[in-house]
Amino acid sequence: MVNVEKLDINQASEEHFARIHRAALVLTGNPWDADDLAQETFLMFARKADRFEGRSSLYTWLYGILLNLVRRERRSWGVRRDKLRILWDNESQHGKNIPAAETSIEVTEWKRSLWSYVARLPEGQRDALVLRFSEHLAYDEIAEVMGCPLGTVKSRIFHGLASLREMLSREETDLQDVPKHPFEDLTNVI
Amino acid sequence: MSFDAKHNDGAGAAPGDVLLDDGLPGDLAALAQQLSDDAVRLTDSYPADAERLAHNVRRRSFWRDATLLRYGALAASLLMMIGGGLWIAGQFAENSAGGGSVATKPNDTSDESSKTAKENVSDVGVPMRPVLAIDQARTGDPINRLTAEDVLKMTGPQLDAYGDIRAEESETMESISF
């Protein structure tokens, strides 16, 4: 437990900034958004520190703030993507050639990692997997952060992993269907 | 992206099964391990400059507070201005309503009792100076405070005299026209 009276932003950021940043990085896939979200989390903390009652660990409380912010950001990303899509469609109709606005800015490293697949999972499963396998929180701590029963956390983690496995095996199958070389058969004949 | 096939040898679990990490079937446990490794690799690739970011947080926190203060001061000033305006309007309305009968139409001659002293005086041609003097001596307020009756009471002889003249004039006119 943390002594609520002694909470201050310097101490909190020293102790917990790195882990909050890592979770943000894993969730968003790029360091710029991770920086913003991690900073925003601590700003929120600075503003609402008086609401922290000390019944849980400070870092679980911070994870809760981060997940809320990520959720909010994802919603706004969705809106932005829709607007860009409309813009793109309009421009295409006018025959203008503009760069693909939807091009992802996510970094290569993240795309190569399993976390890019986790990002496609439903929100509850995604958050549970991040808190468990990136942040290594205990199940009861995850339940506390997500505000749900312990059984739900276990279930989300299990089904999240199962969905991930399915996603990967589907992708593997799709890749196998594509010939390695367009003239592969011909070269064998020759 | 391909998942290492050597891990896919674990026993499967029925859908709906709830398992702890230790009890995860082999393939899922391996996935979990790979997730963990990927998180470490990502963090190594893009380490957080915690000191710089924490500094940013403190700076932004300060400016956000300062902005809130600025907006607070602006809102307080606006409220004070609105309050002052309302108070002035209230005072004006009170002054206007406190003078008793006030004519709304300066040239309306249909209702004699509602006329102000000024209008009556204009109508009948009584000199303004005595009326002003009387009014100011009585109330200290502008001339509109006096009613027609007041003026009649105080300047009776002059008005009566003027009335007689008017009566004579109208008789003269009648006699001319016939």
Image: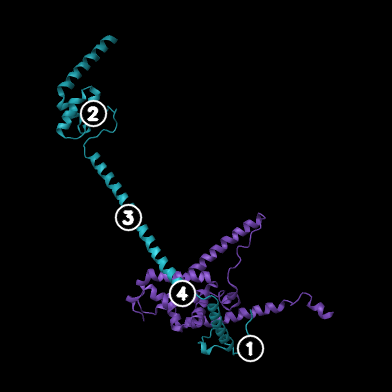
Chain colours: A purple, B cyan
Q: Position of residue A52 (x, y in %)?
A: 36, 74
SS at badge 4: helix
Classed neighbour count for the residue bearing mark 1: other residues with Cα under 10 Å, few (<14), some (14–19), many (≥20): few
Residue at the image position 28 percent from the left and 33 percent from the top: B104
Question: Closer to the N terminus: mark 4 or mark 3?
Answer: 4
User: What's under tag 2, amino acid-wise?
Assistant: Lys
Q: Quadrant of residue A187?
A: bottom right
> Measured along the vertical axis of the image, is residue B126 above or below residue B141?
above
Tags 4 and 3 both on a single chain: yes
Q: Are marks 2 and 1 on the same chain?
A: yes
Type of amino acid under label 1: Lys
User: Is residue B26 shown to the viewer in this render?
Assistant: yes
Q: Say which residue label 4 marks.
A: B50
| Image quarter (top left, top right, bottom left or bottom right) of the C terminus of chain B | top left
Mark 3 or 2: in front is 3
Q: Which comes before the other along the chain, label 3 or label 2?
A: 3
Tell me the mark number nearer the camera, choosing from 4 and 3. 4
Q: Position of residue B20 (x, y in %)?
A: 50, 87
Kindly tell me whether residue B178 is visible in this rendering: no
Provide the chain ID for the residue under circle 3.
B
- How far is disc 3 from disc 1 in space, using C-alphas? 69 Å
Q: Position of residue B61 (x, y in %)?
A: 40, 66
Assign a secondary structure to mark 3.
helix
Q: Name the kind of residue labelled 3 in the image.
A: Ala
Q: Which residue is mark 1?
A: B6
Q: Circle 3 sits on which residue?
A: B76
Counting the numbered discs, the total is: 4
User: Cα distance, mark 4 to mark 1?
Assistant: 38 Å
